Amino acid sequence: MKQAIAGVSVVAAIALSAAAAPAQTKTITLGASVQITGAMANPGHYYRDAYQLAVDQINAKGGIAVGDQRYQFALKVLDNQSDVNLGVRQYVQLITSDKVDFLLGPFNSNDALDDSSVAEKYEIPFVQGGGASSQIFARGYKYVFGTLPPADDYFGSTIEMLGKLEPKPKTVALLSADDSFDVSVATGTRKLLAKPGLTTVFDEQYAEHNSDFTTLLSLLKSKAPDVLLWGGHEPEALNFIRQAKSLDFSPKDLASFTVGVPTADFRKALGKDADYTFGMTVWLPSATLKDDWFGDAEAFAKQFQEKYGYPPDYHVASAVADVETYAKAIAKAGSLDRQKVRAAIAAIDFDCLYARVRYAENGQIDLPQTAIQIQNGELVPVYTDHFLNKPQYPVPPWNARH
Amino acid sequence: MLLAQILTNGLLLGGLYGLMALGMALIWGVLNIVNLAHGALIMLGGYAVYFMFTAAGIDPFAALPVAMLVMFAFGYALQRFLLNLIVRSAPLNTLLITFGLDVVLTYLAQLAFSADFRAINPSYAGANVTVLGITIPLARLAAFAVALVLAAALWLLLERTRLGRAIRATAQNLVAARLYGVDPRQLYAVTFGIGAALAGAAGGLYGVVSQLTPYVGTNLTVKSFVIAIMGGLENPFGILAGGLVIGVAEALAALYLGPTFTDAISFGLLVVILVARPVRSLKGA
């Protein structure tokens, strides 16, 4: 008898909750495995923070309308401990046991390259803003989209700028790491350098996570290039620049670095030694970039800084664009069906705080890089397809600074 | 000239490598603990110097002795209250617990210090002198000198003091040492403390020539391990020589084989040495 009563109450409870359901908001869960700890934890937390703020903001503004039903985003972020293999296992877990609806990406091309294969296998859209390597998009995958522009072209605007500088640089050294992103950077840069006017006098690769550059610096110094184009990640860039100073190496005209220069952390760690360094970014927090949820990029940057205590760089903006891609695509598809949402993402075209977002046939966005320079501790945009500000050029040697 | 420059780079780097390995070799040789948390101790020493420099404006080289004292106390306590409990159990247990310590220290460091990249950047960090066309970074030269001084100090301590004799006696024959009045619990804690202090000094210097995150430790543990085996655990100058060999070998590998081969060379050398002189290199262990 007792069991019967319990049974009835369970049935009643189920019936009640079913009746109450339409009034509740439903959730769409976005899953990601990100570097929250480990060697990549610093850039990794850009992604976690960006996803969280984007999800909170979209929910606060009423969520997403799918048909006549309103949905809220939920976020499930796992820590891959900066381990590519663990990341792959966690994406499988997110799909098979956590049953997330759609996937967001990790930081870094190496990770995105492997993680995206899981998404493709399970046919779940994977919109990622952390992997720029062309390798990710060269496999004919249907479910993988990227909001960082092709790594091959990171030095595109910089090399174009070299042709317009006085005195005109003649010799170039190319140094890059051996991970997926930097291999892609180097391959693309070699093509860009093949034009007349510039001679490549040095082209070397170093091991990712290398911390000692003294041999390479001595080799570089012996080649005395006018320009150094450097591919790698932030910790390596910091080591390289500090060791370059201690061995008194600076290229005659300028040095440009793929990653690190736009971040506040880079300037903080190097202090005055960051000055004159060139780099690139696809994004600057400009009020001209309008956004449906944050107003514009400038307002977003302010809000982000207030919440997390550091200014956002292009990685952060790219990650927000990933979440917004889902918000737009799901609303447009009017469904949570993965095929329909995938089709909506492939066809999407919208303006947001990051850029005008639309994906090429291979799934990757294409955006121009803005060449930047640190001038007196400030990040100054220098060149896109024309000069935006006057570069401090040629860069003085170390002993002539300050 | 290029070769001379690259050899100089390798030697200066090797001195720092040697200092990193000194503490590990001491602890390994005396306590028979392969301290997998050694790199984490180096990292903590680096942060200690970093914060003394950035928060209190203390010159990093002046901060080194303070960092060493702090790390000595930390190492002493670790051994006295934790590692002494398992020091005589199976080697696997000591490996497990030091591995666990490494994980705990690393993650606590991220909680406390965040994963931001930091560099100890005094105004002279990039200063250099040119001698006979060879550019010598002053900070690296100073780090090399500190490594030499500390290796000599450790040698003197081990060879010329009562404490040193007790440490060596314990390493050679624990039972006999006890009969002569050595209290191993105390002695182990002091030895581990000295090892941690040496790691702390290495960390401060590493922060000056390179950069710090809570995760730099793992690679440094591995490097110290290789050098400790090469150097042979008994003689501090042997360890320093091991560091120099690795430093120069890496520099030459980067020059002649390509920069991606540096790790392959240091581990390749380890294999060669283990095959060529297994008895001597394991005697102290």
Image (cartoon, coloured by chain):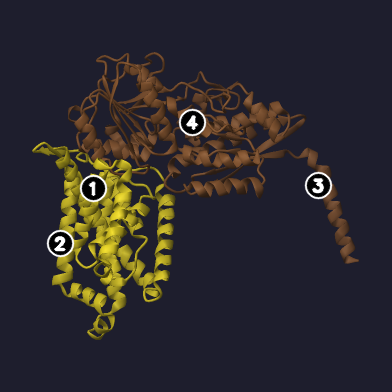
Chain colours: A brown, B yellow
Same chain for labels 2 and 1? Say yes or no.
Answer: yes
Mark 2 or 1: in front is: 2
Gap between marks 3 and 4 measured at Cα: 48 Å
Nearer the N terminus, badge 2 or badge 1? 1
Estimate the x, y position of residue B94 in percent, counting from the top left: 39, 69
Same chain for labels 3 and 1? Say yes or no.
Answer: no
Residue B152: give its label.
2
Gap between marks 4 and 2 measured at Cα: 53 Å
* Circle 3 SS class: helix
Looking at the picture, tell me which residue is in the foreground, A36 or A180: A180
Gap between marks 2 and 3 measured at Cα: 76 Å
Q: Tell me if residue B130 can be seen.
A: yes
Residue placed under numbered mark 4 in the picture? A134
Kind of residue at badge 2: Ala
Residue placed under numbered mark 3 in the picture? A17
Same chain for labels 2 and 3? Say yes or no.
Answer: no
Same chain for labels 3 and 4? Say yes or no.
Answer: yes
Mark 3 or 4: in front is: 4
Kind of residue at badge 4: Ser
Chain letter of the residue beneath label 4 in the structure image: A
Number of other residues with Cα within 10 Å of mark 2, as a class: few under 14, some 14 to 19, many 20 or more: some
| Residue that appears at 43% across and 32% down | A184
Number of other residues with Cα within 10 Å of mark 3, as a class: few under 14, some 14 to 19, many 20 or more: few
Mark 1 or 4: in front is: 4
Looking at the picture, tell me which residue is in the foreground, B39 or A311: B39
